[in-house]
Each structure stands twice: as structure tokens, then as C-alpha cells.
Amino acid sequence: MTVQAATAPGSAAPGEQSFTDKTYAKVFWRLVPFLMLCYVVAYLDRVNVGFAKLQMSKELGFSETAYGLGAGIFFLGYFLFEVPSNVILHKVGARVWIARIMITWGFISGAFVFVNSEATFYAMRFLLGLAEAGFYPGVILYVTSWFPSHRRARVITVFMAAIPVSGVFGNPLSGWIMDTFHQTHGLSGWQWMFLIEAVPAVLVGIAVLLYLDNRPSEAKWLSPAERQVLERDLAAEERTKTDSPHSIATVFRHGRVWFMSLIYFLFVAGQYGLAFWVPTIVKASGIQGNFNIGLVSAIPFVVATVVMIALGRSADHFRERRWHLIVPALVGAAGFVVSATSTDTVVAIAALSVAAGGVLACSPLFWSLPTAFLSGAGAAAGIALINSVGNLAGFAGPYAIGALRDATGSTAAGMYVLAVTLVLGAACVFAVPPRLVNR
């Protein structure tokens, strides 16, 4: 992948611009693939409960509503500790705090092997949310310490391609583990899945301590001239953020931050509605066997990976943010509607692929909006607040779909609700002034 972001015409001589682009390419390849690996591990441990459901719900006697509540309760713990976690990261540095987050959630994810009732399921999901709180907004904040806004959409998009990538590899892997290890040493397949998939989080968390640098000034792998380029560009951008809340207290009184939280809530509802329920929808379409369900479930995420990266490149090239969010949101809504109305397996999977491409592209592109005006401690708290409020949809979405499925015997009503949230999110983005975000 070529990393060559757009720059303002006439802002630098050709030779200087070439050096700048090479510097950012170097930073990209040093940091972003590793951060992406971290998020693949994180997202897999967050949503593998969708595969566990195929065995766990029957063995433990969970209703669809109970499963939806347990899947979503993760986000209550996430919500409560999100802002404090990101403020701590801002103070102690990303290297130590991201490592702590990953190691802690690895151990908790492995402990899911002991779940034996609805109560323990709810408790473990809540604790997993507490442990992981701050990882995602912490990485978003970390990226702002290395890349200016006009280079950021592509970086965040590639980082967030970890979501569909985790689906591409994680879904077949989860299905294979559950089929292969079921009843080995007296444990069910879903227990082995949680245990095995927890190990990478601990190992990668240790690697974070050895690999990441908190900021350009600490990066020994950069030359003095390269560090100067990064620090110059980031300082120039900070001077443009005249409307940013500069303290934690003012973030909570800043109307624009709350409006961004609403937009993100609407997009996240679609994202997690898709992630938690794809295996169930695929199974309902007639696919048999956990491994086969995993392979078919990976198809929408392959499509989403391509769409996310293409839209991220386009957004940075044209320096346009709003329509790059509005269009995929509306397309994703259409995909949900078609998937809900189709009785043909091929059409349903194709529609889910369209929905995945639309809804999963929204999240990384969204973050170019708030990071265009947030800075300093206000950025740490603001990004965390937006992410925590937005991720409450991760609680509401799965729970609502589970309740609707119990009430109607079908996932169709839930898909319609997700489509509506995406349309509302697109409408809210349209209301954002272009001058605020198109930089």
C-alpha cells in the first residue's frame, strides 16, 4: 500500500515535500500495522461471543434476550471507565497503558471458560468492558500525536480495517476451534475458543511495552530531521484549533462534542448489530456446521476491508469528510433492509456484505470529524467521551435485536432498526458545517 497523503498546494518545495512524504510513510509502516494487530486481537476477544452463542446458549439455556443483554453489557463497563482510562493514558503514555489494557483483558477473556450461568456471563462481560476501556480511544489519541488531520483518515481507516480482518480470520478460526476441541478434556468448544483466543492478547500486550514509543521525540528510529518534520506539522495544526475545549471540565459542556457522540452512537449501533449477529443470520440462512458458518460469515468482512481502505484514501485525497460518511451510511442501511427481506441465501449474504462495507467504513471516517477540532487534554477526554457514549449503542443494539428476535422469531425487525439508525446518522453528519472538518 502506498502511503502518500494529500498536502496543500504550494505548501512545500518538491524536494522538501518528498522528504515529508517519505517520513510519514516510515512512521506509517512502523506503527500502523502493529496497532492494527493489537486491534485484531482486541476485536476478536470482544465479539467472539457471537460464535460462542452457537453452543453456549443451548448448553446454558440462554434466551435470545439474555444473550443480547450479555453481549451488550460489555459496553456498560466500557462506558464507565472510558474517560478515566484515556485521561490516565494521556498522563502516563500510550506504551504502558495500552500494554496494561491488553494483558488485563487477555486474562479476563480466558476466564470466560468458567461461565456457567446468566449471572456469571453478565459479570464477565462487564469486567471485560472495564478492562478494555480506553484501548480504542487511546489509539485514536495516540495517532493524533504522530499524524496531522489531513493524513489521519487513511491511518485510522487502515487501523480499523482490523475489524473486518478479525472477522475474516476470526470467524473461521472460532468455528474450527469449537468443532475441533469440543469435549476435549471435558470442556465444550466455546470454552476452548475463549481460552485459546485469549493468549494473543497477553503476548501482544507484552510486545507493546517493547515496541511502541509515546511520541516522535522518543522515537530513536527517526532521524532528527524526521522528528522535526512531524513536530512542525503537528504544532502548526494545534494552532488552528481555536474552538477546542482545552480542559476535561469544558469537554462535558461542549455542545459539539455531544453532537459527535450522537453521530457515533448511531453508527456504532449498526456496527455491533452486524458483528454480534452475523453468525446467527448466516446459520438461519441454511448454512450448516460451525466452520462453514465461519467461512461464510467472513465474506461480508472481506468486502468491508476493501471498502474501508478505498474510502479512507479517497477522503484524504479530496480532503472531504461529510459525503464520505453520508454515502456509505445510506448504502449500509439499504444492505440491512435487503438482508432482512430476502429469502435467498446468496442474496442475503450479498446484502450483508453491502451492509458491512457501508457500516464498517463509517467508524474510521467518523474520527476525522472530532479530531479536526479537539486538542490537548480536551482531546483525551473528548475522544474518550465520544467513544464511550457512542459505544453505549453496543449495549443497546445487540439487546434490542435479541429482544425483537424473541418477540418476532426473526432478525428482520432488528435489521430494520439498524437501517434507521444509519439513516439518522447520515442526516446528522449532513448537519455538520463543512468548514469544521474538511481540512
Image: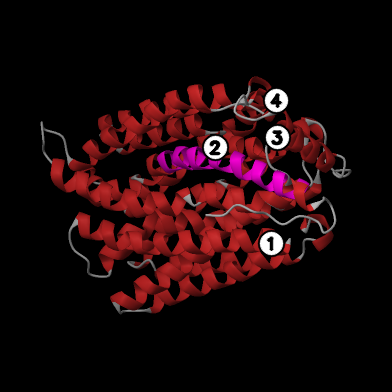
Gap in Å between the C-alphas at discs 1 and 4? 28 Å
Residue 421 location, x and y as percent? 58, 64
Q: Amino acid at mark 1?
A: His
Gap in Å between the C-alphas at discs 3 and 4? 10 Å
The numbered disc on residue 226 is 3
In the figure, residue 203 lies in which quadrant?
top left
The numbered disc on residue 43 is none
The numbered disc on residue 317 is 1
Q: Amino acid at mark 4?
A: Ser
Please tell me which residue is depicted at 64% across the width and 20% down the height of the picture.
92
The residue to which callout 4 is attached is 217
Chain-order first, disc 1 or disc 4: 4
Task: Please indicate whether residue 215 sits to the left or right of residue 116 in the image.
Answer: right
Main secondary structure along the magenta-highlighted residues:
helix
Q: Quadrant of the image for the C terminus? A: bottom right
Chain-order first, disc 3 or disc 2: 2
Q: Nearer the viewer, residue 131 or 135?
A: 135
Badge 4 crowding class, 10 Å Cα cut-off, few under 14, some 14 to 19, many 20 or more, is: few
Q: Amino acid at mark 3?
A: Glu
Residues at circles 1 and 3 in contact by the CB criterion of under 8 Å: no
**Which contiguous range is marked in magenta?**
16-42
Q: Amino acid at mark 2?
A: Arg
Vertical side of 335 occupied by 293: above or below: above
Please tell me which residue is depicted at 82% across the width and 39% down the height of the picture.
238
